[in-house]
Image (spheres, rainbow, N blue to C red):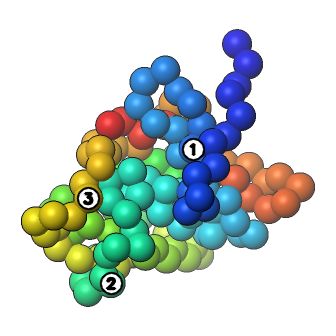
């Protein structure tokens, strides 16, 4: 079975077709930038990031040596933090020191009238890939919606 070409909407977030759920792609010059981009793509499924204010922040920390598993842990930690604090997240940052990852996001409380889109329940190991390409890094996985 051949992989469908990525879909690139006007906002710059990238997705790929999948029979169920949604595949997200993050790209960047570094692994960290690719993870931040994957987080933006994940949360853009739920709400338009351009419509959100960066009023409140959450932080996440974890240890993981495997880059692919780190992507899933990063996305799931953000999803959990957003749920715990009732936030729609839009701006992301992550840094790593060896196997230690620390990052966070800013957003605003869910509000009446916010475009919720489709809820993302979590990142999965399906089609999981973090790799260096000719143009930088690419981080992808399927998220459960």
Mark toward the viewer: 3 or 2 = 3
Q: Quadrant of the N terminus?
A: top right
For image coordinates 68% across by 28% down, the residue present is: 4
Q: Element under label 2?
A: loop
Q: Secondary structure at mark 3?
A: loop
Is residue 96 depicted above or below 114 in this figure? below
Disc 1 secondary structure class: strand
Relative horizontal placement of residue 101, taking residue 81 as reference (left or right) = right
- Can you tell which mark lies on residue 54? 2
Depicted 123 relative to depicted 137: above or below: above
Quadrant including the C terminus: top left
Residue at 55 percent of width and 76 percent of height = 95
Residue identifier under label 3: 115
In the image, 31: left or right of 100? right
Report the number of discs.
3
Residue under numbered circle 1? 15
Give the residue furthest to the bottom: 55
Q: Residues within 10 Å of mark 1 (few under 14, many from 20)?
A: many
Residue reaching furthest to the left: 112
Query: Disc 3 or 2, which lies upstream in sequence?
Result: 2
State whether residue 99 appears in this view: no
- Is residue 42 something that shows in the picture? yes
Q: Tags 3 and 2 in contact by the CB under 8 Å rule? A: no
């Amino acid at each position: 079975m051949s992989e469908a070409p990525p879909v690139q909407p006007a906002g710059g977030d990238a997705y790929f077709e999948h029979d169920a759920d949604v595949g997200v792609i993050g790209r960047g010059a570094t692994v960290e930038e690719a993870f931040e981009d994957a987080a933006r793509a994940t949360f853009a499924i739920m709400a338009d990031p351009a419509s959100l204010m960066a009023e409140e922040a959450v932080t996440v920390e974890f240890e993981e040596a495997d880059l692919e598993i780190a992507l899933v842990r990063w996305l799931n930690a953000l999803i959990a933090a957003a749920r715990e604090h009732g936030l729609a997240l839009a701006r992301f940052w992550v840094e790593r020191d060896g196997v230690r990852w620390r990052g966070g996001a800013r957003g605003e409380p869910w509000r009446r009238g916010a475009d919720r889109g489709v809820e993302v329940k979590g990142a999965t190991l399906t089609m999981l890939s973090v790799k260096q390409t000719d143009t930088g890094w690419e981080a992808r996985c399927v998220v459960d919606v």
